Amino acid sequence: MDLAGLRIIGRTLGDIRRIEPVVVNNFKILPPCKNDKQKELGRDKIGYISTHYNACLSDGHVKLTENRKFAGLIFEIQIRTMPQHVWADFEHDKIYKSKNELPENYQRELYLAAA
């Protein structure tokens, strides 16, 4: 759905809690409003953690001449901590997009390292 993306990386979970309201108050957030990947995992699972929003520019931003060409452009905003980003970057190439499936015991070791 998204054609463009924005990733915001904070140092700590406290940073993330301060960043999220800034995003929500400055962009038009589209349904589903918030996709918290950690909640999808549940409390007993380990893996990819990030918060995603589908968004577009707010009406106030689109009124500006320089932004009119972006009216209706849907983009994804990802918000995560630095450690979450390092894991996501590593997992994306080695597990998620890999052409070869990693043996289960290696996958387990990677997820334990993420924990």
Image (tube, rainbow, N blue to C red):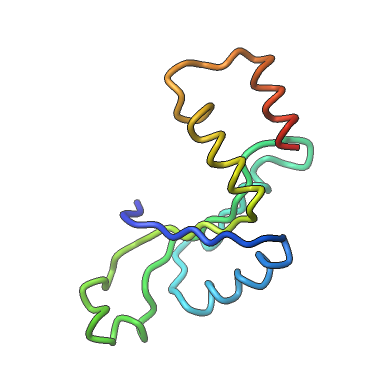
Question: What residue appears at the point 56 percent right and 34 percent down from the top-left corner?
Answer: 91
Q: Quadrant of the C terminus?
A: top right
Q: Where is residue 75 drawn, in percent x and y?
A: 38, 60
- Position of residue 39 relative to residue 76, above or below, is above
Q: Where is residue 17 drawn, in percent x and y?
A: 68, 68
The one nearer the camera, 72 or 13, is 13
Q: Write down the quadrant of residue 79 in the picture.
A: bottom right
Q: Write down the quadrant of residue 14 in the picture.
A: bottom right
Left or right of 38 in this view: 31: left
Question: What residue appears at the point 37 percent right and 69 percent down from the top-left corner?
Answer: 56
The one nearer the camera, 12 or 39, is 12
Left or right of 115 in this view: 32: left
- Position of residue 92 relative to residue 53, above or below, is above
Left or right of 114 in this view: 67: left
Question: What residue appears at the point 29 percent right and 65 percent down from the top-left corner?
Answer: 73
Q: Where is residue 74 drawn, in percent x and y?
A: 34, 62
Question: What residue appears at the point 60 percent right and 51 percent down from the top-left corner?
Answer: 50
- Position of residue 108 relative to residue 52, above or below, is above
